Image (tube, helix red, strand yellow):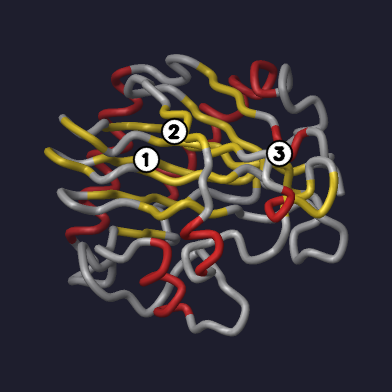
């Protein structure tokens, strides 16, 4: 599992144009009907990201300081399409993640102009963690920004990043001053709409600032049998 925690993978054109368009149509309709439940920008009182000792709103401000849409409650029609896409692409995912057998449910995120995600590590998949069976994260893009919004990973040989092979130290997020000032190498993805990006739970990653348009994607975590 630790080896998979550093794996980077992709599945190109993992869904059809019709599926991507329908997913975006359905989630846009769902968000519009939510009457402001999913905040487009600025402050949020909930986040899928967590930082020990911080509230959800504080964690959201650390990870996405300019806000984002984050939708963790998706309509059954959306989940059905995503389930079909995941099932048929699982054999390709297993080239890099042979222990992956399922996922733990999907959520949707969207970034508008000037929105981004600061670098961080997810940390799932370690003994004692809330999700010890999580190998990595899958991101399915259904709309790419016209400019900016690229996903990236960062690497570093600095010993302050690591507890051991494939095991990142705690505190690798933008709330930690030493992490903010540390020099790392950034590797930027140039992917197309409908591509899946997959990264391990010990990988430093984030997204660049959207300069034009909007970036829309569905995400889930890969699980082992455990």
Q: Earlier in the sequence, mark 1 or mark 3?
A: 3
**Residue 187 vertical position relative to residue 180 in the rendered view, above or below:** above
Q: Are marks 2 and 3 in contact (CB under 8 Å)?
A: no
Image depth: mark 1 or mark 3 in front: 1
Q: Are marks 1 and 2 in contact (CB under 8 Å)?
A: yes
Residue that protrudes farthest toward the left in the picture: 212
168 relative to 120 in the view: left or right: right
* Residue at 46% across, 73% down: 59
127 relative to 48 in the view: left or right: right
**Residue 192 vertical position relative to residue 108 in the rendered view, above or below:** above
Q: Position of residue 122 (x, y in %)?
A: 61, 54
Q: Position of residue 185 (x, y in %)?
A: 51, 35
SS class of the residue under badge 1? strand
Distance from disc 2 to disc 3, alpha carbons, whole Å, reads: 15 Å
Q: Which residue is mark 2?
A: 140
Q: Nearer the viewer, residue 158 or 39?
A: 158
Distance from disc 1 to disc 2, alpha carbons, whole Å, reads: 5 Å
The dot on residue 102 is 3
* Residue at 47% across, 29% down: 187
- Label 2 CA crowd tier, 10 Å (few <14, some 14–19, many 20+): many
* Residue at 15% across, 41% down: 211
Name the quadrant of the N terminus. top right
Q: Nearer the viewer, residue 137 or 90?
A: 137
The dot on residue 217 is 1
Image depth: mark 2 or mark 3 in front: 2
Q: Position of residue 19 (x, y in %)?
A: 35, 25
Q: Nearer the viewer, residue 193 or 84?
A: 193
**Residue 226 vertical position relative to residue 131 in the rendered view, above or below:** above
* Residue at 72% across, 17% down: 95
Q: Position of residue 195 (x, y in %)?
A: 43, 22
């Amino acid at each position: 599992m630790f080896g998979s925690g550093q794996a980077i993978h992709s599945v190109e054109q993992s869904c059809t144009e019709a599926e991507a368009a329908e997913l975006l149509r359905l989630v846009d309709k769902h968000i519009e009907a939510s009457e402001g439940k999913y905040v487009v920008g600025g402050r949020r009182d909930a986040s899928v990201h967590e930082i020990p000792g911080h509230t959800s709103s504080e964690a959201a401000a650390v990870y996405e300081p300019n806000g984002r849409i984050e939708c963790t409650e998706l309509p059954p029609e959306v989940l059905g399409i995503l389930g079909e896409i995941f099932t048929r692409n699982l054999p390709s995912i297993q080239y890099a993640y042979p222990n992956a057998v399922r996922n733990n449910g999907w959520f949707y995120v969207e970034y508008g102009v000037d929105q981004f995600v600061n670098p961080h590590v997810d940390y799932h998949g370690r003994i004692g963690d809330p999700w010890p069976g999580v190998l990595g994260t899958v991101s399915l893009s259904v709309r790419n920004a016209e400019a900016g919004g690229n996903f990236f990973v960062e690497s570093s040989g600095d010993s302050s990043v690591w507890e051991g092979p494939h095991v990142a130290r705690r505190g690798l997020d933008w709330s930690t001053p030493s992490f903010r000032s540390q020099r790392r190498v950034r590797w930027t993805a140039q992917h197309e709409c409908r591509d899946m990006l997959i990264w391990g739970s010990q990988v430093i990653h984030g997204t660049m600032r959207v300069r034009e348009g909007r970036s829309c994607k569905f995400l889930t975590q890969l699980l082992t049998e455990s």
